[in-house]
Structures are given as structure tokens and as C-alpha cells.
């Protein structure tokens, strides 16, 4: 009898794990236990988001993230289908690392172009293949778990933080105005330390 129960439990575990959704990692940087948590909602085709990554993020990283004072989470808020597909690519390794995400933002001029979604996808694939040789891009684009993760980020942004535009910064659950102004952001963070 004990053997049958054991086999039954093994089968339940096997079927539950076989059909369970895989957990898609949130892309983040910094100290997991930091006192200050910044959530940035962004769209990969958004020029202002690209500007944030080029002009604000490097100082933020140097002054606060690399020093362990801040954890930053990059959340998805795609504004169009091209951004949605790029977000799928950014999450495809599912390792929580931000390298590909930053690369996509910093090089928007190479892939954010075209008249149709097919043009955007073709440019996105060309760019990623040039920089990330080991990704199965077609598999990334049809991964339902990644799609759900991205859409849930967007829903969370609207529902819990009233996100209406990108980039939107949330610092310890409070919306921060003017994410393009590093001086103001730095002063705000220094007061919280």
C-alpha cells in the first residue's frame, strides 16, 4: 500500500511540474535587499526610455546601484507590438540580467524602424542575431510564459501605479515625476538614504 501511495505522489508531482508555467524572471540590478527600490516602467520603442538609459541610468548606476543603495527593476510597458516583441527578446534568456535590455535601448536607431510590424521584427532579429548568437528568436517570440509576464507587468503598472506614459519611475511605491532629470532624482534618493 505504501508503495502505491508513493508512486501516486510521484506521478502527481511529475504532472504538476510538467504542466506548471515556468517563472519568468524580472530584469533587475543592484542589491536585492536595498532600502530603496526603483521600478521603471518602460517601452523598448520609446525614445524617452532610450534617453533615460543613455543619459540618466549611467549616473544612477554609478552613484546608487553599484554602491548597493538601490535596487532597480525594469518592468515592461510596451506601447506597441514592436516593443512587445522586443520585450520578449529581452526576457528570452530568463536570467534576470539586463545586458540585452540595455543594448536594445542604447541601439534603438538600428532596429526601431520600418513601416510594418514585419519590418520592425526583421530589423529586431537582424540586430539581435548580430549581438546575441545563442538565442532562438522565433521561440522567444512565441513563448506564452514570457508574453504573460510582460502583459502582467503592464497591467500592474496601470492598476497599481497609474502608469500612463513611459518611462515612469516608482521609488518605494511612489511615482517620481520627471525621470529625465538626474539632479532631481539624485536629490530625492539622497534624502531617502
Image (spheres, helix red, strand yellow):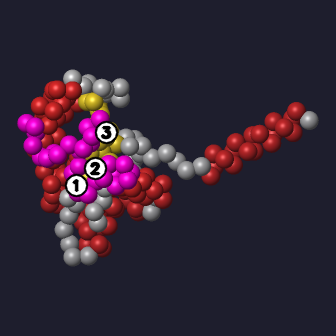
Residue indicated by mark 2: 41
Q: Give residue 86's position: percent from left, percent from top.
A: 31, 58
Which label's residue is closer to the chain start, 1 or 2? Answer: 2
Q: Which mark is residue 166?
A: 1
Horizontally, residue 20 falls left or right of residue 75, namely: right
Furthest-right residue in view?
Answer: 1
Question: Where is residue 94, by image quadrant?
Answer: top left
Mark 3: secondary structure: loop
Determine contact: label 1, label 3, CB under 8 Å.
no
**Is residue 68 visible to the viewer in this orientation of the structure?**
yes
> Is the residue marked by circle 3 packed among few (<14), some (14-19), or many (20+) residues within 10 Å?
few
Residue drawn at point x = 87 percent, y = 39 percent = 4
Residue extent of the magenta highlight: 156-184
Q: Which mark is residue 173?
A: 3
Residue drawn at point x = 39 percent, y = 47 percent = 93
Instruction: Check the image and report above or below for 56 versus 190.
Output: below
Amino acid at each position: 500500500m505504501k508503495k502505491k501511495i508513493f508512486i501516486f505522489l510521484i506521478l502527481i508531482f511529475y504532472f504538476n511540474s510538467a504542466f506548471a508555467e515556468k517563472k519568468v524572471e524580472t530584469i533587475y540590478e543592484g542589491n536585492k535587499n536595498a532600502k530603496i527600490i526603483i521600478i521603471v516602467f518602460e517601452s523598448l520603442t520609446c525614445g524617452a526610455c532610450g534617453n533615460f538609459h543613455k543619459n540618466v541610468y549611467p549616473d544612477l548606476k554609478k552613484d546608487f546601484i553599484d554602491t548597493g543603495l538601490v535596487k532597480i527593476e525594469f518592468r515592461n510597458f510596451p506601447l506597441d507590438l514592436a516593443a512587445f516583441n522586443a520585450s520578449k527578446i529581452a526576457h528570452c534568456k530568463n536570467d534576470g540580467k539586463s545586458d540585452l535590455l540595455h543594448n536594445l535601448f542604447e541601439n534603438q536607431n538600428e532596429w526601431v524602424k520600418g513601416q510594418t510590424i514585419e519590418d520592425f521584427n526583421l530589423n529586431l532579429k537582424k540586430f539581435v542575431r548580430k549581438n546575441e548568437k545563442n538565442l532562438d528568436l522565433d521561440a522567444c517570440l512565441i513563448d506564452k510564459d514570457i508574453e504573460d509576464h510582460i502583459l502582467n507587468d503592464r497591467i500592474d503598472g496601470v492598476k497599481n501605479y497609474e502608469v500612463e506614459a513611459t518611462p515612469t519611475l516608482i521609488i518605494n511605491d511612489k511615482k517620481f515625476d520627471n525621470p529625465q532629470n538626474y539632479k532631481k532624482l539624485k536629490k530625492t534618493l539622497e534624502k531617502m538614504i
